[in-house]
Amino acid sequence: MKTLIKICGITKLDDLDCAIEHGADFIGFVFVRSSPRYIEPKSAANLVFSTSKKINTVAVMQHPTQSSLDEVLEDFTPTYVQTDADDFESIEVPSKIKKIKVYRAEKSLDIASIDVESLALLEGPVSGSGQMANTEILQKACESNNLFIAGGLSPDNISSILETVNPFGVDVSSGVESNRGIKSKEKIIQFNKIVRTFDESKQ
């Protein structure tokens, strides 16, 4: 089965085209103003409109209010909205938009609480920090759930993570950057190639 690849924090058209051309399945646009990867919703919409390729788009948010979510959706219609699982209890997402629920790979995590009805993502304690999640928790969670994993992934460690965890999907952001918030096409290509080579080895 193909490992799904999500490249997060895209802000430029050439990076978007590179990610899609080299096998990304999902593109994440970050709508968290404090992030160096923040992009205006209108700019994200223009990027998607400007590319000739089809892609699953993700509006990445952090504890959004209903009004902040509505502001994004006014200018940009993603395939998915992504935020912490608990956040979805206090916001209303249009039925045509799917959800990615974020869980933290902490010792307190109850793996049985992960919602398997929608896509889920398991990451380190702080989003966008590049902090590696606990491998043991990742292993246990991925044994029984179709999960994206995130947090500290890069071309340098993705091969061993794939072998150890064998996740449903992988999500990378800072690990494919040349500088904070600046994507590296070389690293995107390298990361995606390693994942696809791993997939081929399982066939």
Image (cartoon, rainbow, N blue to C red):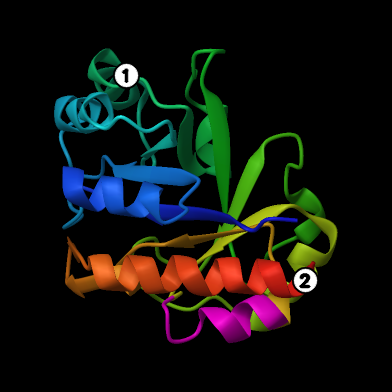
Q: Which residues are magenta?
A: 154-163
Q: Residue at x 47, y 27 (%)?
A: 79
Q: Quadrant of the N terminus?
A: bottom right
Q: Is residue 183 above or below residue 165?
A: above
Kindly identify the residue that appears in the image at 41 percent across and 77 percent down.
154
The percent position of residue 89, horizontal first and vertical second, equals 57, 29
Q: Quadrant of the C terminus?
A: bottom right
> Where does residue 127 sit, x and y in percent of width and height?
39, 60
Q: Do we see residue 169 in this rendering?
A: yes
Tell me the element at label 2.
helix
177 shown above or below 113: below
Residue at position x 41%, y 56% from top? 22
Residue 159 or residue 88, whichever sits in front: 159
| Residue where numbered disc 1 is placed | 73
- Name the quadrant containing residue 106: bottom right
Q: On residue 191, which mark appears? A: none
Q: What numbered label is drawn on residue 202?
A: 2
2 or 1: tag closer to the N-terminus: 1
62 drawn magenta? no
Looking at the rendered structure, the kind of residue marked 1 is: Leu
Front one among 137 and 90: 137
Residue 7 in the image: x percent, y percent? Answer: 39, 55
Q: CA distance from mark 2 to mark 1?
A: 39 Å
| Label 1 CA crowd tier, 10 Å (few <14, some 14–19, many 20+) | some
The magenta stretch spans residue 160: yes
Compared across the picture, whether 164 is left or right of 148 comes to right
Q: Is residue 36 left or right of residue 103?
A: left
Q: Main secondary structure of the magenta part?
A: helix
Q: Residue at x 83, y 66 (%)?
A: 143
Q: Secondary structure at mark 1?
A: helix
